[in-house]
């Protein structure tokens, strides 16, 4: 499937359909998986933050948040969501730099809910190395990688076999690793075969 990338005028329009579809739903249930492993509050990165459901969840748990998403329209929605939520503006930093060019600040938590695999495959290893470097000792990563049997696996997206995915976490302590392969639907209700790794890992102290 063809999907506009950051900088393409159609990027925000493409993602608007997704954000509109998930707007009435609660935050992603992966955050409930992550919750028992949360470190002490500090700076949390929300990588691919969309309209900010995970951002608000993190702010509610005492983290300051650095939200990053290449879609400026979704980011405006995130800022509005945080404002309506009554959070002091100083607790949120935003960036609309694409993952491929991002510099991540040092953090105690990095969350990327169904986002990181949208990184261009030619840039994934570099982006992942930067994200790993941003994890302070004891910091936690939580997010998804896409497996090769996923219907979206294509030269446009970053996907990893089980052994490739494990290799990315060498040196990190795996706290939760769940490989899910099933027929289901996209957020827009289209049939889709999913092959996803749900991962929570911690950089040792
Ligand atoms: C499936 S959405 C998930 C959004 C949010 N984490 C959530 O759970 O609602 C993926 C997000 O990644 C962002 N994105 C996709 N490719 C990107 C890239 N190359 N750089 C930065 N953001 C990107 C999109 O704008 C979108 O908001």
Image (cartoon, grey):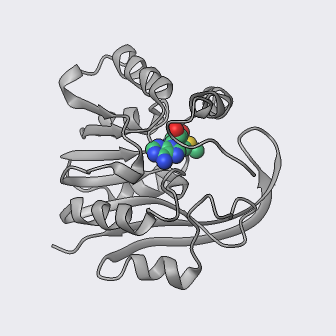
Q: Residue at left 71%, top 65%?
A: 150
Q: Is residue 181 left or right of residue 27?
A: right
- 30 or 146, nearer to the observer: 146
Closer to us: 32 or 64 = 64
| Residue 31 sits above or below residue 123 on the image | above
Residue that extends furthest to the front in the rendered view of this protein: 8
Residue 59: % across, % down: 30, 34
Residue at (36%, 22%) from the top-left corner?
82
Establish if 56 lies above or below 28.
above
Is the C terminus in the top left, top right, bottom left or bottom right quadrant?
bottom left
**Residue 175 image offset from top left, x and y in percent:** 39, 72
111 and 11: which one is in front? 11
Q: Quadrant of residue 63?
A: top left
Question: For the point 20% across and 52% down, which residue is it?
Answer: 40
Residue 1, image x, y percentages = 75, 52
**Is residue 153 rendered to the left or right of residue 141?**
right
Instruction: Find the residue positioned furthest to the bottom.
Output: 163
**Residue that lies at the very extreme toward the right in this rendered image:** 191
Res. 24 image quadrant = top right
10 with respect to 106 (left or right):
right
Q: Position of residue 116 (x, y in %)?
A: 48, 55
Residue 95, above or below 144: above
Q: Which residue sits at x=38%, y=36%?
A: 55
């Amino acid at each position: 499937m063809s999907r506009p990338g950051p900088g393409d005028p159609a990027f925000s329009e493409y993602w608007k359909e997704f954000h509109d579809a998930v707007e009435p739903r609660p935050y992603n249930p992966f955050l409930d998986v992550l919750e028992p492993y949360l470190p002490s509050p500090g700076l949390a990165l929300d990588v691919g933050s969309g309209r900010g459901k995970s951002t608000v969840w993190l702010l509610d748990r005492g983290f300051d948040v650095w939200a990053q998403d290449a879609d400026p329209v979704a980011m405006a929605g995130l800022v509005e969501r945080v404002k309506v939520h009554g959070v002091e503006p100083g607790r949120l930093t935003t960036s609309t730099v694409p993952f491929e060019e991002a510099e991540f600040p040092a953090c105690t938590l990095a969350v990327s809910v169904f986002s990181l695999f949208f990184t261009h495959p030619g840039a994934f290893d570099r982006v992942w190395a930067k994200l790993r470097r941003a994890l302070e000792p004891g910091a936690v990563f939580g997010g998804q990688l896409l497996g090769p049997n996923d219907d979206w696996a294509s030269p446009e997206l970053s996907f990893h076999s089980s052994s490739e995915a494990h290799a990315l976490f060498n040196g990190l302590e795996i706290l939760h690793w769940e490989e899910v392969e099933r027929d289901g639907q996209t957020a827009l209700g289209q049939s889709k075969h999913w092959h996803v790794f749900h991962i929570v890992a911690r950089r040792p102290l």
